[in-house]
Amino acid sequence: MIFVYEKGFGFEHEMREKGVGLVFIISAPSGTGKTTLVREVIQQLPGLQFSVSYTTRLPRSNEKEGGDYHFVSHSVFQKMVERNEFLEWAEVLGNRYGTPRSDLKKLELEGFDLILDIDTQGAKKVMKEIAQPVLIYLLPPSLKVLRERLMDRGVDSLEMVKFRLSNARRDMEEADGYRYVIVNNRIEDAVEELKSIIIAERCRRGKDIVLEENKRQWEEKDG
Ligand code: 5GP
């Protein structure tokens, strides 16, 4: 992967502002507050883009086409599968969800960081396809709070809430394999934690670029 940065002072700053081509995967059971968290962090941190998945599920009243998801029919989704347009796709609670490869291509060209909001099955598939994605699992403060949030948001029947909870339990067992776990007690704290993780990973992954540039500057100075 090639990144083009303006050289000289402020180079590291520019790198952090633009991102370094990292892929962050955030997984969480439905109702944990992942969407709010990701939106807030994208607003606050430059150089970070959200990968908008495709889904066959119907939009909820507050969801926008192209913002939350690309909402497509089963046949359109199937055609995309056949054309190998998804980095990964999975069936979740009876609907299909897929991550488009196109965002990854853009990332390779432009060098920003990408955040994928996908489930644990999707994360496993992405790990086979790309080098070193950063895995972050978001937990609700407790199962009781998760149940209450699912009931309060009023988008699911009682049956569906029960179903989501039994899935959540299984899903949470996968959190152990993730690099980071954030507990969403207070959204403000979760935002700070996620931002810190992203900044730390940018510093870590940008180390080689910074050291190389530093060396180049010394060599230039010494003639
Ligand atoms: P919801 O219908 O509540 O928006 O999402 C249900 C689940 O599907 C969530 O766990 C979410 O992370 C997951 N999901 C959303 N987009 C994708 C995707 O592109 N791939 C996979 N594997 N899971 C996804």
Image (cartoon, rainbow, N blue to C red):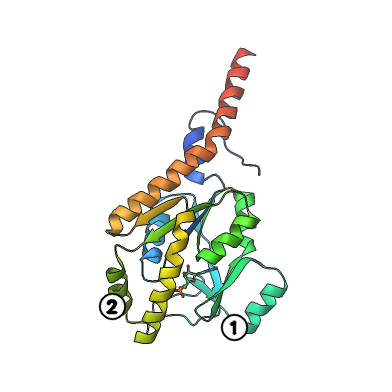
Q: Label 2 neighbourhood size at 10 Å, few (<14), some (14-19), many (20+)? A: few
Q: Is residue 27 visible?
A: no
Residue 119 in picture, x, y percent from top left: 50, 66
**Quadrant where the image shows the N terminus:** top right
Badge 1 element:
loop
Q: 134 above or below 203?
A: below
Q: Residue 121's mark?
A: none
* 84 or 106, nearer to the observer: 84
Residue 131 percent across, percent down from the top left: 62, 49
Depth check: give the residue in front, 211 or 129.
Answer: 129
User: Is the C terminus in the top left, top right, bottom left or bottom right quadrant?
Assistant: top right
> For the residue marked with disc 1, what is the amino acid?
Ser
- Mark nearer the N terminus (1 vs 2): 1
* Secondary element type, mark 2: helix
Horizontal side of 38 relative to 214 (left or right) equals left
List x then y, in percent, for residue 30: 40, 71
Q: Quadrant of residue 126?
A: bottom right
| Left or right: 168 in relation to 57 | left
Nearer mark to the viewer, of 1 and 2 = 2
Q: Label 1, on which residue?
A: 73
Residue farthest toward the right in the current orientation of the protein: 83
> For residue 152, which numbered disc appears in the image?
2
- Disc 1 under 8 Å from ligand 1? The reply is no
Rate crowding at label 1 as few (under 14), some (14 to 19) or many (20 or more) other CA atoms within 10 Å: some
Asked whether the viewer can see residue 163, the reply is yes
Please state which amino acid type lies under the numbered disc 2: Asp
Q: Position of residue 155 (x, y in %)?
A: 36, 82
* Residue under the image location 44 percent in, 41 percent down: 200
Distance from label 1 to label 2 (Cα)? Answer: 29 Å
Judge left or right: residue 157 versus residue 53. left
